[in-house]
Amino acid sequence: MVYSVGFKDRVLETINGKKTRAFFLSLLIIIVVLLPLGVNNYVEEVMTNTFFYIILALGLNIVIGYAGLVDLGYAAFFAVGAYTTGILMRYGLNFWLTIPIAVIFCVIAGIIIGGPTLRLRSDYLAIVTLGFGEITRITARNLKITGGASGLVGIQRPTIFGHKLYQITDFYYTFFILVILAIIVSLRIYHSRLGRAWQYIREDEDAAEAMGIDPVKTKLYAYMIGAAFGGVAGAFFAVKMTAISPETFAFTQSAMILLAVILGGMGKIPGAILGAVFLVFFPEIFREIGQMRMLLFGILLVIIMVFRPQGLWPERKS
Amino acid sequence: MPILEVKKLTLRFGGLTAVNNLSFDMDENSIVSLIGPNGAGKTSAFNCLTGFYKGSEGDILFQGQSIFRQKPHKITKLGMARTFQNLRLFKDMTVLENVMSGMHSRTSAGVLGAVLRLPSQRQEEKKIRQVSEECLDFVGILDKQDRLARNLAYGDQRRVEWARALATHPQLLLLDEPAAGLNHDEKDQLVDLIRCIQKDLGITVLLIEHDMGLVMKVSEKIVVIDYGQKIAEGTAEEVKNNPKVIEAYLGKEDEE
Amino acid sequence: MHAMTVFYTIIQQLVNGLILGSFYSLVALGYSMVYGIIKLLNFAHGDIYMVGAFVGFGALGIFGNALGIGWLGITVALVISMVLVGFLGIVIHRIAYQPLLNKNAPRMSLLITAVGVSFTLFNAVMVMTSGEYKAFTTSLGYDGISIGPINITYTQIIMVVATAVLMLGLYWFINRTMYGKAMRAIALDQDACRLMGINVTKTISLTFFVGSALAAAAGVMAGVYYGSIHFYMGFIIGLKAFTAAVIGGIGSIPGAMLGGLILGLLETAGTQLPFVGSAWKDVFTFGILILLLVTKPTGILGKSEIERM
């Protein structure tokens, strides 16, 4: 064939080109925006759920992908956010005002967990975060204010500009906006002084420290920001579900979010998105697997780590 | 006032004394070398100065302020930069990004600045870039700024390390065996570079080096240690003829 | 009279703590051994314990008719479980961990793989048991020695003795046999061992075998002791056994034994404290763990690591 020489390269170049990327990205956004016009509630529900996991995956990606820290209790932050909003709204506070408070509580939780433990080696950190996740869940189950084992029910729906958010389409767009914000925040932080500091530490902690970077403080920032993502997601989760219970935030939840990040590829925003999409879509498409879902996820996690630790999303060459 | 004063520094690992009662000081804008046979404790002493090891006893004053047992990043922030004996670059980042790390302790933009792209943050980013490019230009590899650090030739990787250390704006620069692995020409260029760092940038330099030719050429003062202890101190000429030094390097005659 | 009641309570709790501690020790040993040899926090170890309990349960179901469900049947089930789960340990090592060790993968990858293995094991058992509790029925009664109000059943005594026997056996194995020496040597310097002709991979597999077998033993004993088993039983004990290993100094065999006992005693004491109680006892344990990791990460018998560089 005449054009076979370098054809593949040319195709790849076109696909990777900046203009093409922008085109596909716009197309994707348009499809997502228009989607609710043409599909039923079920699809919208699944999509909203996906958006929700994308936010969590992007938050955990900051901790694990950018800063290179293991966190096996990420659901705890999401729990703190959800419970804070749920409880404060019960006392009559407006939903939108509970968000900053939820974020502050999550950041404090991040400092409590990270402050004393970030000096530890990565494997100890894993266990501590796991323990922290469990402590949060047990605490939620044992306290009166959190509603004990049955959790909080009857959380009010929020209103914005006089419009009450209660239909699935409302939440579809709300969570979609949150996804866009999460991506922008992730991108901007990554390409900043702090984002670079995480990279330096991940590559060589001693060298980074010799360059005047405080490793503990820098890592703590990752925890705080990751926690804030979890807090926001949790707050919106509470009003979407109108009910939360401690078991929602069990280890399985943390492991799922971890899988989303690992599957797509640590440290890559499209990767985290791809991972979350897979996580939600897969069991919906293959309904018959039912209980096997978690088992397959476990096996998948091992397979990914053994054969493709960089995740499914391709590495960009520079 | 000397820029650096080391007072009776001692470092023990369990039963082993790596640095023993070491004292010396450095004048502002001088070039001093710390030499000694293999395993004499040079690198241990160096790591105490930069905070990577916590000394057991003694004191280290930098510009009159004690930095003994301080954390490395704090020491760097005070104005003391180091390089590593076995290159410790951020290998999967570009040359420019590597050098930008040096500006970290001289800048302050935080999370909010980054998320909102505040004017002050954008200004700062521009400055970081500009200073880093200047440092790369100074060591002569500005044209390689967009390459990944791992893809550079060894000699150029060394230069990245120097540029990176210079980007921290140090008053005192500690070079840990900078000539290791360099060829003859590169060593000559290194001598020029060290002199430029001293003369043009006004930075004081402490050198740990094996290459005696280089040490004798650039040092204004040489401190010789053996078994963790100082055995001689003085100019190149003085040290060269000191019997203790000759003994440490060549061994006693009757030992043979 | 108060003084006597308090005294009896203390003795009774001491016995309970000792039993709990025995289980923790056995599981902690596996953690510590694997950590000592390849510096991997084997996250799936708690699940190995759980699988051990279920294999023992299955074996007792098969052989129970012929051998009875008394001590004879239980012993046979215990041995079968130890051997099978030991091999499961080897399989996990070869499939999930060794490929990463060969590639010299970062520690985080190993850790995440271990999380995946854990997830796989407990979900596999969940699917097979439909997530139900299984009654671990035995014919052991509650006979025992009574001193005043204190009751110590024969079952409790036998469990503690069995744990002691297993530990002594392990101690002998590690210190006196060639394989044990190889393990200790690999923990010190893998490359040197390779040069000396020690088959490193095989020795690591052996470590997994021994560690998993001990956890399986603990699983079967816990099933017998508590009378019911569940797919989630390994999760919490995994965390606690790790705590025990850290208390004693991770990597240290006597440390794991000691740490388990200390944790068992602390925890039973903790449930007696006001404000702790059984609802908060897990929080209490993790509190201890976090406190310990922050203040003395080397544990009681652990060696301090040489500083960096």
Image (cartoon, coloured by chain):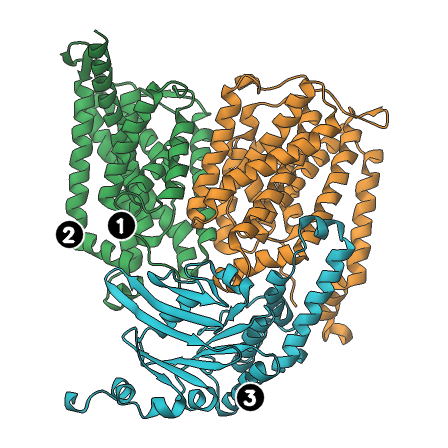
Chain colours: A orange, B cyan, C green
Decide which of A101, C111 is in the foreground and name it.
A101
Q: Which corner quadrant holds the N terminus of chain C?
A: top left
Label 2 sits on what residue type?
Answer: Thr
Point out residue C9 in the picture as x, y percentages from the top left corner: 24, 15
Which marked residue is nearer to the observer: mark 1 or mark 3?
Answer: 3
Which residue shows up at 67% across the image and 46% down it?
A273
* Residue B163 image offset from top left, x and y in percent: 59, 75
Q: Nearer the viewer, mark 2 or mark 3?
A: 3
Label 1 crowd bin: few (<14), some (14–19), many (20+), radius 10 Å: many
Could you tell whether B8 is left or right of C121 in the image? left
* Mark 2 nearby-residue class (10 Å; few <14, some 14–19, many ≥20): few
* Residue C108 image position (x, y, % from top left): 47, 51
Cα separation between marks 2 and 3: 62 Å
In contact (CB < 8 Å): disc 1 and disc 3: no
Badge 1: chain ID? C
Labels 2 and 1: the sequence-earlier one: 2
Residue C169: horizontal and vertical position, in percent? 16, 41
Q: Residue C206 shows which numbered tag?
A: 1
* Residue designated by label 3: B192
Give residue A248's quadrant in the image: top right
Q: Which residue is mark 2?
A: C177
Residue C59 visible in the snapshot: no
Asked if residue C247 is positioned above or below residue B104 in the image, the reply reads above
Which amino acid is tagged 1?
Leu
